[in-house]
Amino acid sequence: PNVPPYYLAQRPTFLDQIVTNSKHIHWVSTQFTREYDLILRRWQLLTPTCTKNIADVIPSVPLLATSLLFKKDTQELKQNMHDCSQFQKNFQQVEFKINDDLIFDLNANRLNNRILFTIPWYLNPGETLPQLSNGRNLLTIMSAKKILEKPSSFDRLHDSITIIGGSNIEGRDWHITPLGWMPGILILVNSIQSLLQYGVLQPPSNWWILLFATILIVSTSFLLIKCGKIWGAVYSTFLIIILIPLSFVLFKYGIWLSFVIPWLAVQFRQIIDF
């Protein structure tokens, strides 16, 4: 449309008819959100498009991969969209639910789409790639040519998410991430792994944070009054250190306690000042 908000239009391609007639081929979006410091930390849930006032939604690679694994149809994202004016109305009301553990808010916040990078491109001496419980590497890079020449290699692809393609610097498909530079195809791998491993990251509820902060403030104040500034600060530091394992446990369930480690750093600074 010629009025904001503006949406991308889909270009016609020779593959359109093939995708339309197949249940196993889908269009996906490889767009990511780049931060002000040019570091890539977040994936996009989907890309809305408007072509001749026909509304459509292109799911991202991690969203589509997860949906296919759990046999969830992403066509639900397009329900009740008759024209492009329906986008904002639907996105304000609709949640896309894959299962009880994976529920996507179409108005996601910055934390929901955070990629937790676990697979680096460059390994230092002595470092190894993360492994699965059966001892198999989380990521295996294979030559497509060798696989085609040796059909028995297909067995290694069984029960795996397989991404066919490559990245190169000339195509500007190398990006800076929290783990350093890596090709775009590895960012796709990390985004899929992040979503499957940790789900949709959620901050604790505001009431939980308020209650938790109140208890910590009261406890810290009591220790400072009872034991004096120096020992009170030391005891308070141990109290915060105890919270770090708790934050890791909650993190496994997609809950991010973002204030624990910064609070510990502030506490150490206070001890040094004393």
Image: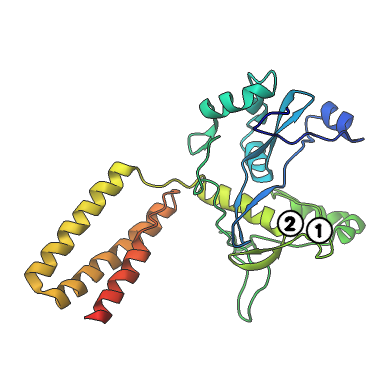
Image quarter where the N terminus lies is top right
Mark 2 surroundings: few (<14), some (14-19) or many (≥20) residues within 10 A: some
Q: Residue furthest front?
A: 3
Q: Find residue 123 and report its image quarter.
A: bottom right
Tally of numbered tags: 2
| Relative image position of residue 238 (x, y in whole percent) | 24, 70
Along the viewing direction, whichever of 254 and 214 lies nearer the viewer: 214
Q: Amino acid at mark 2?
A: Ile
The reply to whether discs 2 and 1 touch (Cβ–Cβ < 8 Å) is: yes
- Asked whether 65 or 30 is in front, the reply is 30
What residue lies at 66% left-to-right and 21% top-to-bottom? 81
Q: Amino acid at mark 1?
A: Gly
Residue 110 position in % (x across, y down): 51, 48
Earlier in the chain: of badge 2 and badge 1, it is 1
Question: Which of these two is toward me, 241 or 23?
Answer: 241
Residue at left 83%, top 27%? 20
Instruction: Name the residue carrying label 2.
Output: 185
Q: Position of residue 166 (x, y in %)?
A: 81, 58
Q: Residue at x 55, y 57 (%)?
A: 116
Outermost residue on the left side: it is: 226
Tell me: residue 117, above or below residue 19.
below
- In which quadrant is the C terminus drawn? bottom left
Which residue bears the numbered disc 1? 166
Find numbered disc 1 in the image and state the secondary structure of the residue it sits on. loop
To which quarter of the image does residue 266 belong? bottom left
